[in-house]
Image (tube, grey):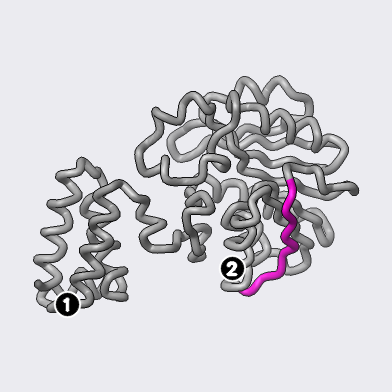
């Protein structure tokens, strides 16, 4: 089987499962199976796969046919131009969350040696990305999940940055005021789980779901008032009106789909 045939076969199988990204996924799967880049896959259609490569490709295809996330199949996801290791213990980083990194970097421009706390760090994508650009910052990344912190530590090591990792629930560990608190908290209502895309359901529920969708957002806003100067939060598409009820809101920013996705608070 050559690359052309492998791509065609994979695309057909994924389309039969109604996977809209079948063509893109096929290239990614083949790239991972062969340990080659996109250019090689697309410019070498006659390359013959070894038996080992075919077996690996078929295993990946079988996983994707069950709608297992492509990020978990690869074991990595690009975020803010960096490759982050991911597994089933953490959410797969989304492009929209890069907005939070942009905002934290912007706010930090006017702060000398900023102290920044990333609550619910998961893979560490926010904390580590910020650390790559702010060498003078002190960054704390917390998560209630010890397994998630292991992933965050791996990513910090892989990308050669230093962050302090703490296992804690929300802001319970924080006793002194910091400059910026940033968080992408669980904000999907528990009752909406069955409506999620099938591949999303493989991701850890505790990182996705919150009782009514706003409990943790409200807690973070109220607790942050005495603990930081700025709070940067990712929010759900229908939560703009909810966050507007709180004092200190200075900005709502929309994502690529023109949906409210980030709320910024300032507490004097």
Point 55% across, 50% down: residue: 98
Classify 10 Å Cα crowding around label 2: few (below 14), some (14-19), many (20 and above): some
Point 72% across, 53% down: residue: 167
Is residue 228 depicted above or below 52 in this figure?
above
The alpha-carbon separation of the residues under discs 2 and 1 comes to 32 Å
| Residue 91 x %, y % | 51, 49
What mark, if any, has residue 154 been given in the picture?
A: 2
Magenta residues, as a range?
A: 160-168
- Residue 259 lies left or right of residue 56; in this view the side is right
Point 45% across, 59% down: residue: 77
Tell me the residue that label 1 is attached to. 51
Which of the two labelled residues, at mark 2 and mark 1, occupies the earlier sequence position?
1
The quarter of the picture where residue 136 lies is bottom right
| Residue 196 x %, y % | 40, 33
Is residue 218 depicted above or below 107 in this figure?
above
| Residue 126 x %, y % | 61, 54
- Label 1 secondary element: helix
Is residue 222 depicted above or below 180 in this figure?
above
Instruction: Say which of marks 2 and 1 sits in front.
Output: 1
- Label 2 secondary element: helix
Classify 10 Å Cα crowding around label 1: few (below 14), some (14-19), many (20 and above): few
| Residue 147 x %, y % | 60, 57
The quarter of the picture where residue 31 lies is bottom left
Does 71 lie within the magenta span?
Answer: no
Check the picture and name the quadrant holding the N terminus. Answer: bottom left
């Amino acid at each position: 089987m050559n690359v052309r045939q492998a791509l065609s076969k994979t695309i057909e199988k994924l389309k039969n499962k109604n996977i809209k990204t079948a063509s893109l996924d096929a290239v990614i799967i083949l790239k991972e199976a062969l340990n080659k880049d996109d250019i090689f896959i697309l410019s070498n259609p006659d390359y013959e796969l070894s038996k080992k490569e075919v077996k690996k490709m078929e295993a990946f295809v079988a996983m994707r046919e069950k709608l297992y996330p492509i990020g978990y199949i690869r074991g990595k996801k690009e975020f803010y131009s960096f490759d982050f290791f991911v597994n089933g213990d953490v959410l797969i980083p989304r492009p929209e969350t890069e907005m939070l990194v942009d905002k934290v970097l912007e706010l930090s421009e006017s702060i000398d040696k900023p102290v920044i706390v990333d609550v619910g760090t998961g893979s560490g994508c926010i904390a580590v990305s910020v650390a790559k650009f702010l060498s003078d910052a002190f960054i704390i990344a917390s998560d209630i999940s010890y397994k998630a912190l292991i992933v965050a530590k791996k990513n910090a090591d892989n990308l050669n940055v230093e962050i302090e990792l703490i296992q804690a629930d929300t802001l319970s560990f924080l006793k002194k005021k910091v400059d910026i608190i940033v968080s992408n908290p669980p904000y999907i209502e528990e009752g909406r789980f069955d409506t999620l895309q099938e591949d999303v359901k493989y991701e850890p529920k505790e990182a996705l779901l919150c009782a009514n969708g706003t409990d943790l957002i409200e807690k973070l806003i109220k607790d942050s008032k005495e603990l930081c100067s700025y709070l940067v939060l990712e929010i759900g598409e229908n939560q703009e009106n909810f966050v507007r009820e709180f004092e200190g809101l200075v900005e709502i920013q929309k994502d690529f789909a023109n949906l409210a996705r980030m709320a910024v608070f300032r507490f004097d």
